[in-house]
Amino acid sequence: MARSPLILVALISLIPLLCHSFSPETPTGRRILVLVDDLAVKSSQSLYFKSLSSRGYELDFKLADDPKIALQRYGQYLYDGLVLFCPTVERFGGSIDQAAILDFVDSGHDLIIAADVQSSDLIREIATECGADFDEDPAAMVIDHINYAVSENEGDHTVIASDNLIKSDVILGSSKIEAPVLFQGIGHSLNPANSLVFKVLSASPATYSANPKSKLSSPPALTGSAISLVSVMQARNNARILISGSLSMFSNRFFRSGVQKAQSSTKHEKSGNEQFLTEISKWVFHERGHLKAVNVKHHKVGEEDEPAVYRIKDDLEYSVEIYEWSGSSWEPYVADDVQVQFYMMSPYVLKTLTSDKKGVYSTSFKVPDVYGVFQFKVEYEKLGYTTLSLSKQIPVRPFKHNEYERFIPAAYPYYGAAFSMMVGFFLFSFVHLYSK
Amino acid sequence: MALETLAGVISLASNEIGQSRIDAVKNDILKLFDSIEKYDDGTFYFDEKVDGVGPLATTSSVVQGLTAFASTASGRVKLPEDNILGLTKYFLSIGIPGDAKEFFNQVNSLSCLENSRVSVPLILALPATVVSLTNKDKLKVRVTTALGSRSPPLKVKLVRAFISGSKDASVIENQELIFDSEGAFHILDLLPTSIDVGKYTFVFEIVLQDSEDAKVYVTGGQTKVPVYISAIIKIENAEISVLDSDLGSVDTQKKLNLGKEDDVSLAANHLQKLRLSFQLSTPHGHAFKPHQAILKLKHEKAEHIFLVGNSGKKFQVILDFLGLVEKFFYLSGRYDIQLSIGDAVMENSFCQDLGHVELDLPEAPEKAPRPAAQPDDPFSKYGPKAEISHIFRAPEKRPSENLSLAFLALTLLPFLGFLVGLLKLGVNLKNFPSAPVPAMFAILFHVGIGSILALYALFWLKLDLFTTLKALGLLGVFVMFVGHRILSHLASTSSKLKSA
């Protein structure tokens, strides 16, 4: 009788192992909460949601002011990612508010925000916290009279076909996006002091942000290439945030439509929206560009064990293994710009690690002739990749008394003096005792 | 859904149910339609706040039930025309839903509306609302039923056309459109009219030719459609000049080719003004004010934007540098000039670099504001750093080997001098003991001393202190013993000699 509760407890304790949740071993979380203004969004952006669910994500659609929504319960987060497709929400329902969303990001989870014309202040404030400042005029839209998408039904040039994409294979995938990306919404600018946020889709020099229905009375605040249409932020804890100024960019209509840029005669069959948004969602949910570094090893050349102390002017070898998460498994990461520093207050040695194409990076160098407590530091920052920050402490001692150079030619006179003294004494012992 | 089942019941038992019951159901239907909701653009829909059931599903079930009921019940169900048309527009405006079930609902509802006996809605649509005067496009209008089949014979009339947002009188009144039976379009040729470029609202009305059709078909009164009439705008007399401030006299003046390449280079100081002027006119010769008329001056550290104002056809902007010195943060240097002119109805919008102007502004005073920081290129921040290799401390300079060897020779000189001195003194080994036992001790004594010296040499070469001391202890004891014997022997022989 005492057996069955024991078995029950054992079974229950196995349950956490069955959860596919966000953890350092599997950085791609599974459960995503999608908050929308009205459920028509679920069907009008259905191609985009299908691309997410076909990669294994569980999407939970809720109205933004549903009183039962919550991000965490009893300290545990219920979701691994959040998608806010609710540009006009004034107040979230349930226990979600701006502070809760920012806490969610601070704990390492990912976020996608889509604003649109007539966005509420709440969405704008959340975007400002993430580094993107939207135009203050709520009726303003991004207008471009040169790079608009030619259309028979929309004549006010607010649907822009943009191909100013960031050049980064890790964020946008390795295949080039041929067709321009359609965008209709509001633009934002990025704070120049913020080094964590960058533009992924930016506007052309002729773009400006204004209300299309009224004349301009003062120069527009956002003009030219400073306008960002879609930007991305990677926080210091490697949480990733996508900020887009257009909700209709994700819609089936834009995914399927052809594009012809004004003042150009090439007609593309399909816009680049689907490829662009699918690839960037892969990046946001850590399916690309997420690195981990394991197995830091260092030893003297010729030895295998890791010593506790190095001596100055030793030759040593340092190696580390770096892997990249591919969405389902850890693949070896290949690059040629990972560097290691031998650091005490400032780097004494900085060397680029060579890769053996299987994920192991190694190099060797001579320990400097300064003694103290050093650190092996790897600070790897690359656009679009998580930051690697490794540090291993190791002391360095000076020479022992018996490790100095012996038999120095400059000392020959001294050797000569001593030995001639010894030989002289030996001879003298004979002479002194036995001569008459 | 309730209505559909009810319709099914009625169709099965059509004869027995009394008229009063049917009237009751009709009243209920009217009450249901009171709860209809509408979007701003005139579409109507039903919404039930039940989780998981969207407005599309709710509205389509109402429509299907209604048409099923109407097809079985006798007598008409009186519903306002707007509602039917609004519901049809709702189904048409969703686009293509992603879910297959919702798609079925949408198409099924549209076909119910089309075939219904309540009233068939007629939809007026324009395939293109952007019409170009330069390309000599004609405005086309098409009228069909909800699922696209042909409408009965009718005429489309353009009641009014006026510029959107303005309260002016309309430009065109009561014009009938010509029916092109080939493409089933109604066409309006814009050229003979005096319509100029701009954003217009066209108000259309459908007039059914056969009055019988009015009972079956629903036309929806007047339909407002926004239409954009665009054309190429003529740009003339573009020039840029630097003026001397007080007198207004021209210092330098250059002609510009707006719309094509331009690269002027001007120089100005803070006492002068920069003037840019040009003329814009529409194909019909009227003045045209574009939405975007922006002049940008770009310095490497700051960017400044100005609007180009107009009076009638002439556009002009004068930048008085004296007043702008503080706005420009007192930065002198090269400013690139860029002009952007654009509008929704202008087909030749452009954003063009005109050249540059070298500005000479006075020095900044102490408290002048600084320009905002410019954003960095993200790629430049993230490159690999330069390699550092430690430069080891150079060892102290040692004297050359030859010098050391020379001094080695010098130190050995006293030894040689010692040997020479010994020989000069005439040393000999006469006192060496001849008897075997003392001789042995003597030899052992010298061997012992030699071995101690050899031990010192060995210690210098490779031994450590501990083994050396151990060996020294043993050797020392031996030498002491042996030495005592020989020395005492020597002392006794010499004292014997002395006493004798």
Image: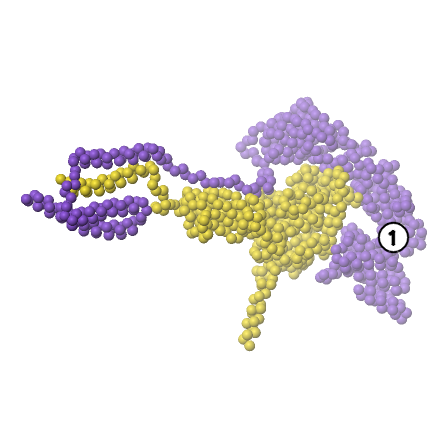
In terms of depth relative to the viewer, which is nearer, A114 or B409? B409
Going 63% across and 35% down the picture, which residue do you hit?
B303
Q: Position of residue B423 (x, y in %)?
A: 18, 35
A32 and A286: which is toward the camera = A286
Image quadrant assignment for residue B432: top left
Q: Position of residue B294 (x, y in %)?
A: 70, 35
Give coordinates of residue B128: x percent, y percent.
Answer: 82, 44
Image quarter where the N terminus of chain B lies is bottom right
In the image: residue A395, left or right of residue A187: left
Callout 1 amino acid = Ser
Q: Residue at x 31, y 38 (%)?
A: A412
Where does the image place residue A429, in percent across and percent down from the top left?
Answer: 19, 42
Q: Residues within 10 Å of mark 1 (few under 14, many from 20)?
A: few
Please indicate whether residue B209 sits to the left or right of residue A183 in the image.
right
Q: Residue A131 vs residue B170: left or right?
A: left
From the viewer's side, name the closer residue of A381 and B35. Answer: A381
Residue drawn where x is 64% and y is 33% of the image: B298
Outermost left residue: B500
Q: Chain of mark 1?
A: B
Describe residue B397's horizontal placement relative to residue B321 as left or right.
left
Q: Is residue B110 above or below residue B340?
A: below
The answer to whether any part of residue A235 appears in the image is no
Q: Which residue is mark 1?
A: B149
Above or below, A46 relative to B172: below
Which chain is purple in the rendering? B
Q: Colour of chain A?
A: yellow
Which residue lies most toward the bottom here?
A1
Secondary element under disc 1, as helix, strand or loop, is loop
